[in-house]
Image (cartoon, rainbow, N blue to C red):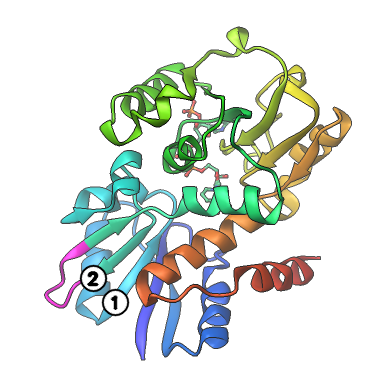
Amino acid sequence: MDHYGVLGNPVEHSKSPAIHARFAELTGQAMDYCKLLAPLDNFAQALQQWIDSGGRGCNVTVPFKFEAFQLAGTASERATLAQAANTLSFGDAGQIAADNTDGAGLVRDIQLNAGVSLAGRDILMLGAGGAAAGVLGPLLMAGPRRLVVTNRTHAKALDLVARHAKHPSLHAMLQKTELLALEQQGLQANFDVVINATASSLSGGAVPVDPRVLKPGALAYDMMYGAAAKAFSDWALAHGAVPRDGLGMLVEQAAESFAVWRGVRPPSAQVLQEMREALA
Ligand code: NAP
């Protein structure tokens, strides 16, 4: 039996153990997966304890994704672009390899599960925190016409965009895609896809953008899910957009982590359907 878990603070609310248990059951993998509360001031020690106790890998959630990346000895290209990791794998001598599956999860949920192609579209992303950092590279790789990042703290959006704009692996994509960081007042109207990667839904705050950014029928995607996503969903419906919550991203990023660890892709669409029914 191989052991995995999710380290975070808080972590009690996490649905990852249920998702991975179902993936393991459906693919016949001998593994278990638990919640691991890490102290806010000592993530490194909690991670080392998990490695020493025989863990084979872990997911990392708020607020440790940046620290997890720093602690790793090696990192995938997508984790390097994000400078953040949500998936760690451990070698036999305790070496830590970092990956970031958030972007792959988001893009798969939008394109495959929601059936919305991102190629040639105009995308607006709200936020420049850990989640936004994790998804910007994979969104670019999907080939949009324009990808705009806007954030309450503009300097963070500028940094995020600048880091991606100068990364050699994205040069070819940036011939096709206009990548910009803009302040709210500089935003044009009419985006095909608006992604809320801020924590505004979590704090019950207002949707942090003017509704004129939504093209009629646009996809309005909130990374939040469950009751917390309702305000954003209501806002989208009231302005002629099609809302989608982040449950699919959650299941798809977990499926990608599972594939990294086990070399097997689990049936994520089936598990997403089961999770939706359980939430309803
Ligand atoms: P984070 O690193 O703390 O970043 C928070 C971001 O939200 C920052 O851009 C921040 O702006 C912005 N923000 C916070 N409150 C705001 C408000 N009231 N109005 C406008 N902007 C606000 O958090 P994170 O890791 O990026 O997570 C962001 C959200 O994504 C969380 O709700 C998280 O649960 C969700 N998420 C979902 C999945 C999934 O699988 N579905 C995966 C990852 C994350 P400033 O820079 O100005 O502070």
* 272 left or right of 44 in image: right
User: For the residue labelled by badge 2, is the local secondary structure a helix, a strand or a loop?
Assistant: strand
For the residue pair 152 and 46, the one nearer the viewer reads as 152
Residue tagged 2 = 90
- Inspect the magenta stretch and tell me whether residue 46 lies in it: no
The quarter of the picture where the C terminus appears is bottom right
Residue 46 position (above or below residue 107): below
x, y percent for residue 10: 48, 58
| Total tally of numbered discs in the picture | 2
Residue 16 in sight: yes
* 167 left or right of 114 in image: left
x, y percent for residue 242: 80, 39
Is the residue under label 2 in contact with that under label 1 (CB below 8 Å)?
A: yes
The quarter of the picture where the N terminus appears is bottom left
Query: Tag 2 or tag 1, which sits nearer the N-term?
Result: 1
Residue 101 position (above or below residue 174): below
User: For the residue labelled by badge 1, is the local secondary structure a helix, a strand or a loop?
Assistant: strand
Q: CA distance from mark 1 to mark 2?
A: 5 Å
* 72 left or right of 140 in image: left
x, y percent for residue 238: 88, 31
x, y percent for residue 234: 83, 38
For the residue pair 155 and 74, the one nearer the viewer reads as 74
Please give the name of the residue rendered at 44% of the width and 51% of the height, measured from the top-left corner. Answer: 62
Magenta stretch, main secondary structure, is loop
Highlighted range, magenta: 91-96
Please give the name of the residue rendered at 44% of the width and 71% of the height, measured from the top-left corner. Answer: 258
Residue tagged 1 = 56
Please give the name of the residue rendered at 58% of the width and 76% of the height, measured from the top-left corner. Answer: 18
Q: Disc 1 marks which amino acid?
A: Arg
Q: Disc 2 marks which amino acid?
A: Phe
Q: Badge 2 local density, few (<14 within 10 Å), some, or many (20+)? A: some
